[in-house]
Amino acid sequence: MLAALILALTLSSDSVRFPVVTSDNLEGRTFTLPRDFDGERNVVFIAFKREQQREVDSWVPFVKPLLARTPGTEYYEIPTIKRMVAPMRWMINRGMRGGIDDRGARERTITLYLDKEPFKRALGIATEQEIHVLVVDREGNVRWRTAGAFSEDKGQGLARALTSP
């Protein structure tokens, strides 16, 4: 209950900024985020567990056509894993790369290996039990957010966030 209250308070905050992090996508391109996000506004799916890919996938049929109608937008999948040694990162990335046939999906997947607590704290993420969906500009301003699998209400909120000034 307390975690839900903290999350609700955090979701209403206007001062949340995406922290500066550097990592590679599954095609080997290095990104320093949020600066290197390709869109003016970017839909960012942050997942903490392998099984949360289903939650991310629940959004894709809505997000792809929405972004096609919304110039200057992109989306990214950001699996977020604890810091580990290079050989382990290589193995995990290789496994993920091998499981994704679509080159575009590999280009949009940027795995973060970091101390998760400061990252989550910067974004006001209180729980790893569901994905977090953010709209982030290149300056790192979080313009909108929600958590969990897609629903029509969440989708409409995202659409409004991408089309409002």
Image (spheres, rainbow, N blue to C red):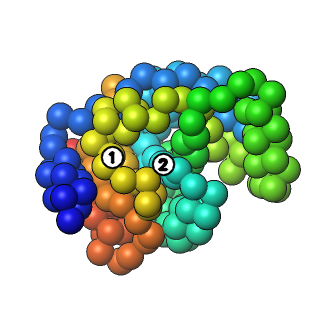
Expressed as whole percent of the image width and height from the top left, the position of residue 99 reads: 81, 56
Q: Which mark is residue 46?
A: 2
Residue 141 visible in image: no
Residue 77: image location, x then y, percent: 56, 48
Q: Secondary structure at mark 1?
A: loop
Q: Are marks 2 and 1 in contact (CB under 8 Å)?
A: yes
Quarter location, residue 17: top left
For residue 55, above or below residue 104: below
Q: Quadrant of the N terminus?
A: bottom left
Of badges 2 and 1, the one in the foreground is 1
Task: Give, as a three-letter code, the residue at label 2.
Answer: Ile
Q: Is residue 129 left or right of residue 80?
A: left
Q: Secondary structure at mark 2?
A: strand
Which of the two residues, 88 or 19, is positioned nearer the viewer here?
88
Q: Using a 10 Å C-alpha cutoff, classify the residue at mark 2 as few (fewer than 14 neighbours), some (14 to 19) or many (20 or more).
A: many
Say which residue appears at 73% left-offset and 33% top-offset. Answer: 89
User: In this rendering, does residue 100 appear at all?
Assistant: yes
Which residue appears farthest toward the bottom when viewing the image?
152
Q: Is residue 68 left or right of residue 140?
A: right
Of residues 38 and 6, which is closer to you in this image? 6
The quadrant holding residue 78 is: top right
Q: Is residue 24 above or below residue 132?
A: above
> Residue placed at 46% from the left, 35% from the top?
116
| Amino acid type at mark 1 | Ile
Which quarter of the rendered picture does the C terminus lie within? top left
Please name whichever residue, 155 or 115, is drawn nearer the observer in this view of the structure: 115
Mark positioned earlier in the residue sequence (2 or 1): 2
